[in-house]
Amino acid sequence: MTLSIELKTETINKLDLSPAKSILDPLLESKEIAKTEQNLKFEIDYIRDPTDPRELSEIPEIRLYFVRLDACYPWLPLILDWKGGELGRYTAMLVPHQFSRTDGIQYNPEALEIFVMNKIFTINEWLKKMEISGRSGLKSMAQTLGYEIDDAFLKKIE
């Protein structure tokens, strides 16, 4: 079951998290969050000038919205639709990057490393609190972003 959070211009500009809360909070309350792994996507409908060449992740208002969303739901990357590119897009909202016509998105390497490690630590603690086993999910998430996480490292932080 794919879940979708619709974000419109007004919602983003007001930093209104209610569209996300209406989907995420019931999942948390019902403990269904573990079954949601990699099924969430965002549908962003942000009005802008047709000549604006920027990607959505280059628009400050959208990035600010995702910074706020990440502060409230720091475990969110775990349930994004990775295969559909949502993890990469979400990461682009939070990590400095540039676009290349030939190579696609190019994250700032140091910023990406800090982001990945922060997510590993944060999500690991959240999984323990929720009593969900997730070592393989953490490793897969990091791998999707280009990092190999060793089992010994994960044991070290448990």
Image (cartoon, helix red, strand yellow):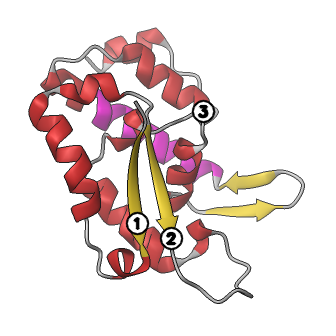
Of callouts 3 and 1, the N-terminal one: 1
Tally the numbered discs. 3
Q: Label 1 sits on what residue type?
A: Leu
Q: Magenta residues?
A: 109-125
State whether the magenta stretch is mostly helix, strand or loop: helix
Q: Would you say the residues marked 1 and 2 are in contact, meaning their CB atoms lie under 8 Å apart? A: yes
Query: What residue did someone put label 2 on?
Result: 45
Which picture quadrant has residue 80? top left
Q: Is 140 left or right of 156, judged from the image as shown?
A: right
Whole-percent x, y for residue 21 in the image: 21, 55
Q: Residues within 10 Å of mark 2 (few under 14, many from 20)?
A: some
Check disc 3 and report its element: helix, strand or loop: loop
Q: Which mark is residue 7?
A: 1
Q: Which mark is residue 47?
A: none
Q: Nearer the viewer, residue 121 or 126?
A: 126
Q: Would you say the residues marked 3 and 1 are in contact, meaning their CB atoms lie under 8 Å apart? A: no
Q: Nearer the viewer, residue 147 or 153?
A: 147
Alpha carbon separation for disc pair 1 and 2: 6 Å
On screen, 7 above or below 27? below
On screen, 153 above or below 99? above
Q: Label 2 sits on what residue type?
A: Asp
Which picture quadrant has residue 1? top left
Q: Nearer the viewer, residue 146 or 13?
A: 13
Q: Label 3 sits on what residue type?
A: Lys
The C terminus lies in quadrant:
top left
Q: Residue furthest left?
A: 29
Query: What residue did someone put label 3 on?
Result: 83
Alpha carbon separation for disc pair 3 and 1: 21 Å
